[in-house]
Amino acid sequence: MSVETPLNLTLITEHFGNAIDDLGFAHGVHAFAAPPQMIVELCRFLKEHPALRFNFLSDICGVDHYPEVPRYEAVYHLYSLPNKWRVRIKCRLDDPPRVPSVTGVWRTANWHEREAWDMYGIRFEGHPDLRRIYMWEGFEGFPQRKDFPLRGYKDELNPFGAEGPPPTRPDLATKNIP
Amino acid sequence: MTEVTELSRPEGEALDTKEVLLNLGPQHPSTHGVLRLVLELDGEYVARVDPHIGYLHRGTEKLAESFTYTQIFPLTDRLDYVCPPSNNLAFALAVEKLLGIKAPIRAQYIRVLMAELARISGHLLITGALPLDLGAMTALLYAMREREMIMDLLEMISGARMHTSFCRVGGVREDLPDGFFPKIREFCDIFPNRIRDYERLIENNPVFLKRTQGIGVITAEDGIDLGLSGPNLRASGVDWDIRRDEPYEIYDRLDFNVITRNEGDCYARWQCRVEEMRESVRIIEQCLEQMPEGPFQIDMPTIAFPVDKDKVHCSMEALIQHFDLSAYGFKVPKGEVYSAIEAPKGELGFYIISDGSEKPFRMKVRAPSFVNLQGLFGTSNAHYLADMIAVLGSLDPVMAEVDK
């Protein structure tokens, strides 16, 4: 595995200036930090630039850095089929987490974003169909957040769950999906 | 001498049609698990499909955050339960990258050998199950016969037929048992002829051909856009295989072909898998030839158990080390890694964020079946309800992996 990045970084820094933070190359993936409002533009740029061509979206995942601030993060893994490069874009998000959807760039983002919404409550603005994907409709809370107990909350169906009712903070409400 | 007459319809008046909502699953044999499809039907055509998943959701990623790295191996077994050794390998590689270590060469060969056995086992299931979904039962029975041979081989290596959990960080659990080589050579001799048998069963079956050729066509652009990977994408003509393009373990020492087809229909996906089984047999044969003698586990007492178990019985330091490792696990340096392998279903990636403790801070599984299932949205031509079954079967989703 080479230690040097295969990417031509000046292409990206020229276009976006200081908005994108270079996090360096490690384990075969080059990482960037980007502000959430730029994510769609950055993805489209990486996908369509003739020298980069990151045309394959491998994965989108949510991360909860509780109790750090900003608390949430959306992580995008891109792959360039022609160049065989990988890139990771990290987007730190405030509470409540909101980030523009990249479904317009790749259709595969649809289910990845639904999963991140379901598990972490990250709202992907502009997503065509942001519903829960694993949990059932009407489930309260976001199970993969660090403050959600591993066994869930105690109720008539779950006698082994943690004590106390599920918190009903406004950002935990599953209604009013954008 | 009967005259063919058209059904009479009042002039200028369209037929009164109504879209019908049909629920398929979650308990239905052709959904290969617990998948529920809500279909909007326009007559016999499927107008819209809405898959509902999550019936098998076990929260693997959440659970992993409270497990030590070694304890996570059994969880990965249960992702794609048809071919667990691949999942073990993917996870082990990700952790090894974070630790900056590599397994000994012999261990790498054993892992690749098992991963290829798993690939054959996974492909056998679907090459048999797709014809079964379409009404040809024989192929599955034959496929299961050969799958049993693989199960026996895996049992010989690991003691378990399905959930092998044989990989460890820095190697494998044990060396290959005595008498394993003749057994697997016998399998390699028999199996290619058996593949020919399946092809003869299916290739000349006009019903199967009619039901799969030209059905569920996914173009290369659509496939990439939808994130398909593995044989599903290669059947659309995209020449991409992680084993060749980002070689891990000892794949760069092996000679194998990447199978592609250009049609992108159900039949092409089926054919790709059949051909890949042949290549897997070739890889296994090369592994057997090239496999060197040597340790099967890295010699690092902080990460792996001592190979010489007797030390534990007579040296106090070794005993403490052994206890420490089994009770608390080992620490992994701070950092993050995304490591992908070519699993039988496609790109299986593990994204691990480590905070420097014995447990991952966050583990994300990029499950190929989860993404491949979105291929249902990518078929360009409208198809009949009955063809939906063929499309679903040819995409080969394993619901345990979809639901994680």
Image: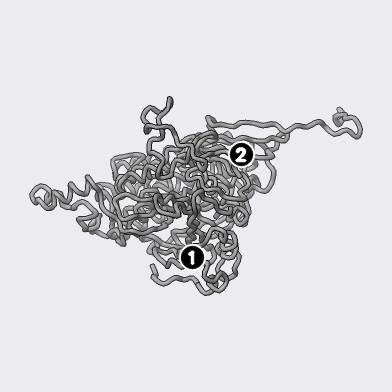
- Can residue B11 be seen here? The reply is yes
Q: Is residue A72 above or below residue B45?
A: below
Q: Position of residue B124 (x, y in %)?
A: 46, 43
Between B91 and A76, the one lying in front of the other is A76
Q: Quadrant of the C terminus of chain A?
A: top right
Return the residue at label 1.
Answer: A85
- In the visual, does B151 lie left or right of B273? left
- In the visual, does B365 lie left or right of B199? left
Residue type for callout 2: Asp
Return the residue at label 2.
Answer: B50
Q: Position of residue A44 (x, y in %)?
A: 60, 62
Kindly identify which chain the residue marked by label 1 belongs to: A
Between B93 and B105, the one lying in front of the other is B93
Q: Secondary structure at mark 2?
A: strand
- In the visual, does B379 lie left or right of A7? right
- Can residue B33 be seen here? The reply is no
Residue type for callout 1: Trp
Residue under the point 34% across and 55% down: B355
